[in-house]
Image: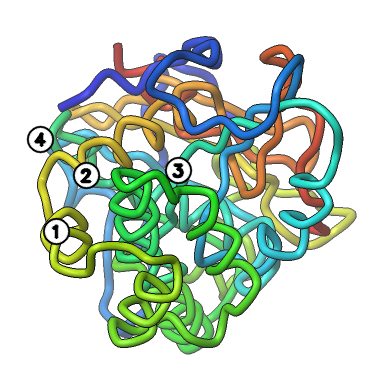
Amino acid sequence: MADLSSAPVPPVGPEDHVRGEGKGLIVYADLGCPHCAAAWAEMAARPGAIAFRHFPVTSKHPRSAALHAAAEAAGRQGCFFAMVDSLYADRGRVDDPHLWERAQSLGLDLERFERDRREASVAARVRRDFQSGIRAGVAGTPAVFDACTLVAVREREF
Amino acid sequence: MIAAGTPAPDFTLRDQDGEKVSLGDYRGRKVLLVFYPQDFSPVCGDQLSIYQEVKPDLTAKGVELVGISIDHSWAHKAFQEKLGIDTTLLADFHPKGEVAQAYGSYLEQFGIANRTLVLVDEDGTVAWTYESPNPGEFPGANVIFDALA
């Protein structure tokens, strides 16, 4: 089992999914989360870089594991953020046939997409991000860090 | 708040299925008591969902996870199903908040338990506690693993 004790947010590295350039945000997000979807367009449109880290809460959003695996598999064909944008823009269509439609519309090799999204290495990649979020104290999504300081969480009443 | 090193007050409460559960049932294992304010509140839902995600990691460390609030078993059952979790939820319903009061977690002004974690060791002794500064905040799961390190 992984060490889940407290640790700083890992700095952005070569294996991160990053869009844009310059100083930016690190976002721990759940592709099945409506709050993340609502915040995504605004976050993605801001100037600077944005690093997306997987934080699927699968008990709450049962399709999240499949959606994060789909994004990761799309990333292997250079379309990670295109898939993320697509999933957040249309949250009502997340079953497998919808994922195939999305992959095709992005011009992905569907056979490779299908193979990749079921690979253990893809699940491990998603899990690694999730665990780094747990160690950083992420307690809800989206959790946004600026220079490794938590700057935004969704407001909630107890 | 109950102090680490003191015997954990025993209790018997009904779970989400109406079955009686006692603290003594966990003797020989570690159990993490998660006192939380109310079923169906947004923060409580997020807290129990996040903890559910790391439940296998807690199990690997020999820790059982148990939620406790002032809600009835019926509410617990519906809340458990809504969240898609299998964490045991105990009803501190009648007398209201009696167990939370025994652990020093009860907020009299609100009529709910504060968001509190109590780790009870294999011998029934309080090994570690955490109390949130207010019911609207909950500790990330990392805090639990820090205590278990």
Mark 1: few/some/many CA within 10 Å (<14, 14-19, 20+): some
Q: Gap in Å between the C-alphas at discs 4 and 2?
A: 38 Å
Q: Which residue is mark 2?
A: A122
Kindly state the secondary structure of the residue where label 3 is placed: strand
Disc nearest the viewer among 1 and 3 = 1
Pointers 4 and 3 in contact (C-beta within 8 Å): no
Is A23 displayed left or right of B43 in the figure?
right
Q: Do residues under tags 1 and 2 come within 8 Å of each other at their CB atoms? A: yes
Quadrant of the rendered structure where residue B18 is?
bottom left
Q: Is residue A55 left or right of residue B115?
A: left
Label 1 chain ID: A
Mark 2, other Cα within 10 Å: few <14 / some 14–19 / many ≥20: some
Q: Disc 1 residue type?
A: Arg
Q: Are marks 1 and 2 on the same chain?
A: yes
Q: CA distance from mark 1 to mark 2?
A: 7 Å
Q: Residue at x 45, y 43 (%)?
A: A54
Q: Chain of mark 2?
A: A
- Percent x, y of residue A78: 40, 44
User: Dot 4: few (<14), some (14–19), or many (≥20) neighbours within 10 Å?
Assistant: few
Label 3 crowd bin: few (<14), some (14–19), many (20+), radius 10 Å: many
The disc label shown at residue A54, or none: 3
